[in-house]
Image (cartoon, rainbow, N blue to C red):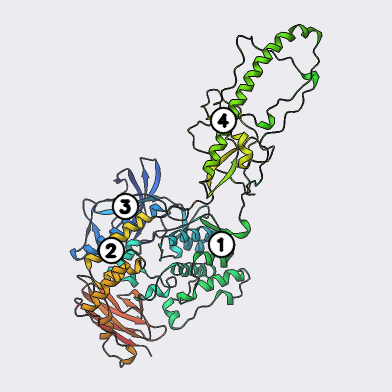
């Protein structure tokens, strides 16, 4: 991270009194010492900090929604008003649930969460400190660097991260150039989801808080359960990011496109630097209606010509392959060459009372002699006349040594047989593993050391060691089964001769999947369901269904909504086109949900559409925006529609029972 990139926590409020007040430099949060502020937003603060426990730098993210709360003298965070407590606590729970959920994932393109905790009446999250800049900043600083080839390389990890999330029914819903962080080595990281913003948006104003013009699809604008959000929602935003990266501007707003589509397809631009497949894939995922878009990450990757490799996607031409031998090959090195007679030196032996001991079976680097090489090479040497007198004593000593060698060989063969039997038994239970030969370590390993990692060279074959290391003095003992691995290598698929003695590494999973965060998701869903039951409102149950449309309590939520509708039927909205121009928008007001406690509401009846501004702040497009929760007060409303005359109206918001109506028809 840098001090200039967007943290994904929203924009700073215009009112200086509502801006967050960061903790001071040098402040301690448990083992973390704050070094500097590296990001501020309307929903939180990000610090660079030093972890004194693990002696490393991290980033600390603090939940601090300045529109709802402020910091007091003891550094604790207090809500600005009692009526905002429920909204603040809902965002706090979502902040913690986001940290808990992200901590369950392990993907290089997702934020790595070290730990999270509550303190100072708020919550904190310690995450990995990344160095680089956002995609938006990089594209502005180095526009010539952002080519199709570069974008495809960046997309691989991002698509893998999105697929990891989507498998667990998690959706980002806030992908934009400011939320894609490019590290110094060009590897991307998808920044935080802004879960706290989503919860606050559900209670305040979802359109104004969550929607990003040009990047948000139509289903994120509409307060309509029939327009479901899913993987296609994230893919639309990602397509908009790619569109802006190659054109310099995002696509038109999805709401404007739904009325009059002015989108210029990449395929029609005739760009020689962009391939037809790339242009077609981006155009497909930017379709206005979700049913016409690319539906899954895998389908989008296929259209781009990317191939899945583990937990990411790569260019299909660059996929390395791991070659595993299918037929057993001898693991023993070729026998040593015959020694010329003139170089043979008579071997001296110790006295018979002190026979030569065998090398301990546990010595590191020791391997039992393979069966094929059990018989030693015979070297015929002409004995000189001077050596005839020592022949008889040498024969006796040799016979004793031979018996020791035979005994050691028998023990080794028994160990080999036992090892093969155990491996054959366990192999029946291993259905997702592959035997991959790996070279021996460069230094002796103890029996308690972890198994070595499999290193795959760019060509896809394991890189063999140049030579087997000699045993070191004092090396830890290795189990006999491990020392006999070279003899059993033909049964497990060994490397070709000449690559050294290879040890089979079993239980190596190919592309092991990340463990699904079922526990975290179940906990988050249970908390949201408890909140919906506590509120017991139509809006609360609908908010639960928007997030968990196939959740454990989806049927109960629908039944509860049906019962609420039976006891208190919602007002029927009247088609605005049937009303004369300037008529009160009572039907629209009746269709709007009740405002949160302590909040008022402004209803809109705009035809055919208009961009709504409240005191100069863009609050969304109407329709689909039908109503807007606001605090009691006086507001200046502006509604704009292209080059047409701006409509202005001054309204007074009192409470949710008497909501003013802004009604206008652009002609």
Q: Position of residue 193 (x, y in %)?
A: 39, 61
Front: mark 1 or 2? 2
CA gap between label 1 and label 2 equals 40 Å
Q: Secondary structure at mark 4?
A: helix
**Which numbered disc flags the more N-terminal residue, 3 or 4?**
3
Task: Point out residue 399 in the picture as x, y percentages from the top left corner.
Answer: 68, 15
Q: Is residue 50 left or right of residue 152?
A: left
Circle 4 residue: 415
Which residue of the protein is positioned furthest toward the bottom in this rendering? 580
Q: Is there a contact, CB below 8 Å, between mark 2 and mark 3?
A: no
Disc with the residue nearer the chain's start (3 vs 1): 3
SS class of the residue under badge 3?
strand
Q: Split into 4 quadrants, where in the image is the C terminus?
A: bottom left
Q: CA distance from mark 4 to mark 2?
A: 59 Å
> Looking at this view, is 412 or 141 the one in front?
412
| Label 1–label 4 contact, CB within 8 A | no
> Disc 3 designates what residue?
124
For label 2, the residue is 529
Q: Nearer the viewer, residue 71 or 577?
A: 577
Residue on which disc 1 sits: 152
Tell me the residue at 62%/68% (across/down): 273
Marks 1 and 4, how far apart at CA: 52 Å
Check disc 2: other Cα within 10 Å, few if <14, some if 14-19, many if 20+.
many
In space, the residues marked 3 and 1 are separated at their CA atoms by: 34 Å
Query: Picture coordinates of residue 5 (x, y %)?
Result: 42, 58
Q: Is residue 292 visible?
A: yes
> Residue 490 lies in what quarter of the image?
top right
């Amino acid at each position: 991270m840098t001090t200039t990139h967007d943290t994904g926590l929203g924009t700073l409020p215009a009112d200086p009194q509502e801006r967050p007040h960061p903790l001071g430099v040098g402040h301690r949060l448990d083992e973390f010492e704050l070094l500097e502020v590296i990001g501020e937003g309307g929903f939180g603060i990000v610090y660079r900090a030093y972890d004194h426990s693990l002696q490393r730098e991290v980033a600390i993210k603090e939940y601090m929604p300045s529109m709802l709360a402020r910091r007091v003298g003891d550094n604790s965070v207090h809500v600005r008003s009692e009526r905002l407590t429920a909204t603040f606590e809902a965002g706090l729970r979502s902040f913690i649930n986001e940290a808990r959920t992200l901590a369950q994932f392990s993907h290089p393109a997702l934020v790595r969460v070290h730990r999270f905790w509550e303190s100072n009446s708020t919550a904190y999250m310690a995450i990995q400190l990344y160095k680089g800049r956002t995609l938006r900043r990089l594209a502005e600083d180095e526009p010539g660097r952002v080519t199709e080839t570069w974008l495809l390389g960046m997309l691989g990890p991002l698509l893998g991260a999105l697929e990891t999330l989507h498998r667990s029914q998690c959706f980002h819903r806030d992908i934009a150039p400011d939320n894609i962080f490019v590290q110094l080595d060009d590897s991307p990281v998808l920044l935080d989801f802004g879960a706290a913003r989503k919860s606050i948006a559900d209670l305040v104003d979802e359109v104004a808080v969550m929607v990003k013009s040009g990047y948000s699809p139509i289903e994120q604008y509409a307060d309509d359960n029939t327009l479901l959000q899913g993987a296609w929602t994230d893919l639309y935003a990602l397509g908009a990011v790619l569109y802006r990266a190659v054109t310099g501007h995002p696509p038109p707003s999805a709401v404007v496109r739904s009325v009059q589509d002015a989108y210029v397809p990449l395929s029609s631009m005739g760009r020689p630097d962009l391939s037809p497949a790339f242009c077609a894939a981006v155009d497909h995922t930017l379709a206005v209606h979700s049913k016409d878009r690319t539906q899954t990450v895998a389908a989008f990757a296929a259209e781009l010509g990317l191939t899945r490799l583990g937990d990411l996607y790569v260019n299909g031409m660059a996929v390395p392959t791991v070659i595993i031998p299918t037929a057993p090959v001898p693991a023993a090195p070729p026998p040593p060459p015959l020694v010329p007679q003139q170089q043979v030196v008579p071997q001296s032996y110790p006295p018979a009372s002190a026979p030569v001991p065998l090398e301990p079976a546990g010595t590191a680097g020791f391997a039992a002699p393979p069966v094929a090489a059990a018989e030693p090479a015979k070297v015929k040497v002409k004995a000189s006349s001077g050596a005839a007198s020592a022949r008889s004593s040498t024969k006796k000593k040799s016979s004793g040594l031979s018996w020791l060698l035979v005994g050691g060989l028998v023990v080794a063969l028994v160990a080999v047989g036992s090892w093969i039997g155990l491996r054959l038994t366990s192999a029946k239970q291993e259905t997702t593993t592959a035997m991959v030969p790996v070279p021996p370590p460069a230094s002796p390993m103890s029996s308690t050391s972890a198994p070595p990692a499999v290193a795959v060279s760019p060509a896809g074959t394991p890189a063999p060691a140049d030579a087997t290391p000699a045993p070191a003095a004092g090396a830890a003992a290795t189990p006999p089964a491990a020392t006999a691995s070279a003899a059993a290598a033909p049964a497990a698929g060994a490397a070709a001769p000449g690559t050294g003695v290879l040890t089979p590494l079993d239980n190596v999973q190919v592309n092991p999947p990340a463990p699904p965060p079922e526990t975290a998701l179940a906990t988050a869903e249970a908390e949201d369901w408890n909140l919906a039951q506590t509120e017991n409102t139509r809006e609360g149950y609908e908010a639960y269904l928007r997030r968990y449309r196939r959740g454990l309590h989806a049927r109960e939520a629908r039944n509860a909504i049906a019962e609420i509708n039976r006891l208190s039927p919602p007002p029927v909205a009247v088609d605005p086109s049937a009303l004369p121009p300037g008529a009160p928008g009572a039907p629209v007001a009746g269709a709007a949900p009740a405002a949160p406690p302590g909040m008022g509401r402004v209803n809109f009846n705009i035809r055919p559409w208009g961009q709504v501004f409240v005191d100069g702040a863009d609050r969304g497009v109407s329709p689909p925006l039908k109503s807007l929760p606001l605090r009691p007060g006086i507001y200046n409303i502006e509604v704009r529609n292209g080059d047409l005359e701006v409509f202005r109206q001054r309204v007074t918001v009192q409470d949710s029972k008497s909501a003013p109506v802004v009604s206008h028809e652009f002609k």
